[in-house]
Image (tube, rainbow, N blue to C red):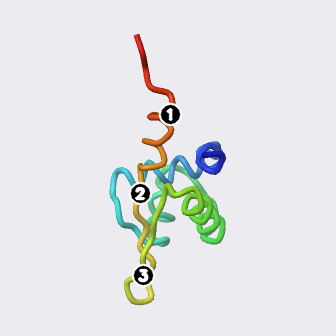
Amino acid sequence: MGDVFRALADPTRRLILDELTLRDGQTLFEICSRLIAHGNTSTRQAISQHLAVLEEAGLVVSHRSGRTKIHHLNTQPLRSITERWPVTD
């Protein structure tokens, strides 16, 4: 669970998750292009490292399609956090 909180602590990683929420199943190139529209000028290598942190935390899963790596949002780790502290009245 610590990995999830660490991954969410970075604004660029949260922006990547926002973009995957809007359009799931993106390549690194597509994610970089969409982040530029938000004024994010991180390099492709930096975005790739952010994606690796998100994958390590389980928030992003990816698969290869030929030479292309496709990234998908995985909300299960977030559900696990909310289920840990149920709301009681």
The first of marks 2 and 1 along the sequence is 2
The residue wearing badge 1 is: 84
C-alpha distance separating marks 3 and 2? 15 Å
Mark 3 or mark 2: whose residue is earlier in sequence: 3
The foreground one among 10 and 57 is: 57
Residue at x 55% of width, y 63% of height: 55
What numbered label is drawn on residue 64? Answer: 3
Q: CA distance from mark 2 to mark 1?
A: 21 Å
Residue at the spot of label 2 = 73
Q: Quadrant of the C terminus?
A: top left
Can you name the residue that lies furthest to the left here? 23
Query: For the residue labelled by badge 1, is the local secondary structure a helix, a strand or a loop?
Result: helix
Instruction: Report the front residue among 79 and 72.
Output: 79
Asked whether disc 2 touches disc 1, contact meaning CB atoms under 8 Å apart, the reply is no
What secondary structure is found at the residue carrying circle 3? strand
For the residue pair 86 and 4, the one nearer the viewer reads as 86
Q: Residue furthest bottom?
A: 66
Residue 85 position, x and y percent, is 50, 28
- The quarter of the picture where residue 45 lies is bottom right
Which residue is at 39% across, 67% downward?
26
Residue 62 location (% of width, % of height): 45, 70
Going from the N terminus, do you reach mark 1 or mark 3 first?
Answer: 3
